[in-house]
Image (cartoon, helix red, strand yellow):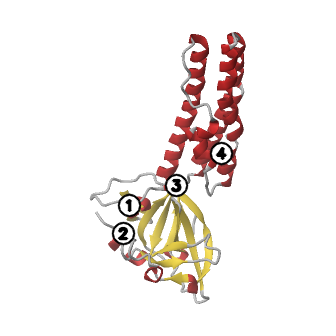
Amino acid sequence: MSIAAANQPMIENESGVLTVFTFWIGDELFAIDIDNILSVTQDMDNLLQPPVKSRGLMGVINYMDEPVAVYNFAEMLNIASTRHIKIGLVELLNASEQDHIDWLDALEQSLKDDVPFEKERDAKLCGFSKWYTKFKARDEALTDIIANFATPHEDIHALADELLSLKNNGKVEEALALLVNARANQLGQLKKYFNQARSQIEESLHTVVINITNDGAKPLVALKIDEIHEVMNFNKSDLRSLDKIGLDAILEMEGLFKGYLGSQDNRSSCLLLDTANLLSSVKV
């Protein structure tokens, strides 16, 4: 996706409007002045190994017949990338799915072998329930999928008392038949939602490379990000110095940001990169 014409001179915006390209890292929104972007691309083919090591440096690509260093922006900031966070979420879903497969297996063993059932019976006390009831995400589709877990999850946990009661009353075969049905239905529903959630997470990852410029023509550096947001307009008066809002002391890379762009609703507030100091802020 081309953002600015590669060989056109940079035109100073005199309108008082600041147009920025925004992207997420974790829960923080970042922005780059649109005038400092040559292109946004998904092409990371032919990435060459870097001749030196620096934090976040992934390699070198050839862009417009110029060698350009590619940095993982999250690693430059020494914070978890969106991809890393979402991979962790997928791993949590995988573990939770296996936990409930194991839960039903343990219940079956208790019914067949008359051994104590020691898994959690109360759905509300299950760690998975505690997680999904508090789950929040920017992705509304993912939030809706996660909300669907509640009913089949509660139904599965309710099986323990019901089936163990049947066993205690000598109705083991009836209990086992209901367990087979639960694997096909309640557990089947859970698995469907686990698959939908994983697919939604994977589809939400859009790794792109932003080619940065300071003169509107020559590439300076490229930044890899995993979750783009949108192009937004702010008033230049919305840009506030970091020291005025107490953020200058906690940012690890001094000089990396021009300031904080604050919107009236705060939902689109973001940190604006200072591309002029971008490379000088990189630490080994």
Between circles 3 and 1, the one closer to the viewer is 1
- What mark, if any, has residue 252 been given in the picture? 2
Location of the N terminus (image quadrant):
bottom right
* Residue located beneath label 3 in the image: 207
From mark 1 to mark 4, how far is it between C-alphas? 30 Å
Indicate the amino acid at tag 2.
Glu
Find out whether the residues at labels 1 and 2 contact each other: C-beta distance under 8 Å: yes
Across and down, in percent, residue 174 comes to 72, 13
Query: Residue 72 versus residue 165: which sits nearer the camera?
Result: 165
Across and down, in percent, residue 52 comes to 27, 59
Tell me what residue is drawn at x 56 percent, y 54 percent: 206
Quadrant for residue 190, please give it.
Answer: top right
From mark 2 to mark 3, how far is it between C-alphas? 24 Å
N-term-proximal mark, 4 vs 3: 4
Quadrant for residue 253, please give it.
Answer: bottom left
Question: Quick check: 90 above or below 99?
Answer: below
Tell me what residue is drawn at x 68 percent, y 40 percent: 150
Indicate the amino acid at tag 1.
Asn
From mark 2 to mark 4, how far is it between C-alphas? 35 Å
From mark 4 to mark 3, how far is it between C-alphas? 24 Å
Across and down, in percent, residue 34 comes to 55, 74
